[in-house]
Every structure is written in structure tokens, then in C-alpha cells.
Image (cartoon, helix red, strand yellow):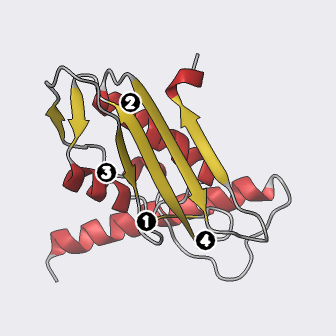
Amino acid sequence: MDPELERRIEEELRRARDHTRAAIQYMARFGVRPGGEVRLFYPPETRQKTIDRIPFTQPVRTRVTYRTAPGEFSAVCPFSGLPDYGILTVEYVPGSWILELKSFKYYLVSFRQIGITQEEVTALIYQDLLAHLEDPHELVVETVYNVRGGIRTRVRVDAREQG
């Protein structure tokens, strides 16, 4: 195998191992031990950082809604190592920019191997979108996760509720 490629693979494995170990140590502080298999996952910093955008020049205000199909959005539970599947909804009224959909899809897919709580991933997506859209008139990011342990989790971040 190409030595540079081998080095990159080893570095990725080290990062995933270190992040997984740190998550297990964090859980132990609260008396939580991983159940079942322990799987490697990546830290949130490894997600795709860019989302392409297109200028929005129309004189009218439009409301844009993106909603993933069931099974299309997931991240990894940092406590169990299992995938958390949910439906992600983004609703915004553009200011100067709109999101380019293919780039946005790749951004969302980049979360599939990220170990992050449901609450944190929703807040992080909100922050990333706000940074890329710069000046939306409204922005709401919501996740509704598949039932786990008999509980359905819904997390919502609304720009109008931020300080």
C-alpha cells in the first residue's frame, strides 16, 4: 500500500480511538458504561466544514424548508456507539444567501460517523447554517429522532429565541 495512504489511515484510526476513549471516560464520570459493543466514531470537528451557497437576489421573501427522508440523517450516539436516526428539518427565510442542495447533502452525510448527542448535533447544525447563511431573516433547525427506549426526542433551535 502507498505509505502516505497508510499513514493517513493510521492517523484517522488514532483520532477515532482517542475520541471514543474520551467519550467513554466522560460517561464514566456519571456512572454510565457503554452497553454492548464499543465502536469507533469521530469527533464533531471532523464534519464537513463548508456548505456552498448561492446569492439570493429576489425582492420577495421566500420561506425555504428542507426535510430529510426517514433514514437519511444520522449520527452516532457517543454513549452506546449505535446510530441515531432522525428527520432533520431546516426552515429559513433567506437574507443574502441560499444553500446549494448537493453541498448541503454532503454536509449532512458527514455526520454519519460523528459521535455526538442529539441535542448537540442540532445546535451545531444551527450554528453552521447561521454562519453560512450570514443574515437569514429566520432560521429554525429541528431534529426528531427515532424512538429509543420508548422515548422520542425532538430538538429545536429557533433564531428568534436566541439572545
Q: Are marks 4 and 3 in contact (CB under 8 Å)?
A: no
Name the residue tied to disc 1. Answer: 112
**Label 3 secondary element:** loop
Q: Residue furthest top?
A: 163
**Residue at the image position 36 percent from the left and 65 percent from the top:** 12
Q: Circle 4 is placed at which residue position?
A: 81
Number of numbered markers:
4
Percent x, y of residue 102? 20, 56
Q: Amino acid at mark 2?
A: Leu
Q: Quadrant of the N terminus?
A: bottom left
2 vs 3, front mark: 2
Give me the C-alpha separation between circle 2 and circle 4. Answer: 29 Å
Give coordinates of residue 56: x percent, y percent. 17, 28
| Disc 2 target residue | 130
Q: Nearer the viewer, residue 140 or 9?
A: 140
Contact (Cβ within 8 Å) of mark 2 with mark 1: no
Query: For the residue carrying disc 4, how many other residues have a C-alpha within 10 Å: few (<14), some (14-19), or many (20+)?
Result: many
- Residue 58, by quadrant, is top left
Q: Amino acid at mark 1?
A: Arg
Q: Amino acid at mark 4?
A: Gly
**Viewer-nearest of labels 2 and 4?**
2
Helix or strand or loop: what does disc 2 sit on?
A: helix
- Neighbourhood count class around disc 2 (C-alpha, 10 Å): few under 14, some 14–19, many 20 upward: some
Q: Is residue 27 above or below residue 41?
A: above
Residue nearer the viewer, 118 or 29:
118
**At numbered mark 4, what does the secondary structure look like: helix, strand or loop?**
loop
Which residue is at a point 57% across and 63% down the rendered structure image? 20
Please tell me which residue is depicted at 74% across the width and 76% down the height of the picture: 35
Left/right of residue 163 with respect to residue 73 in the rendered view: right
Task: Identify residue for label 3.
Answer: 48
78 above or below 139?
A: below
Please report whichever mark, 2 or 1, sits nearer to the chain's N-terminal start: 1
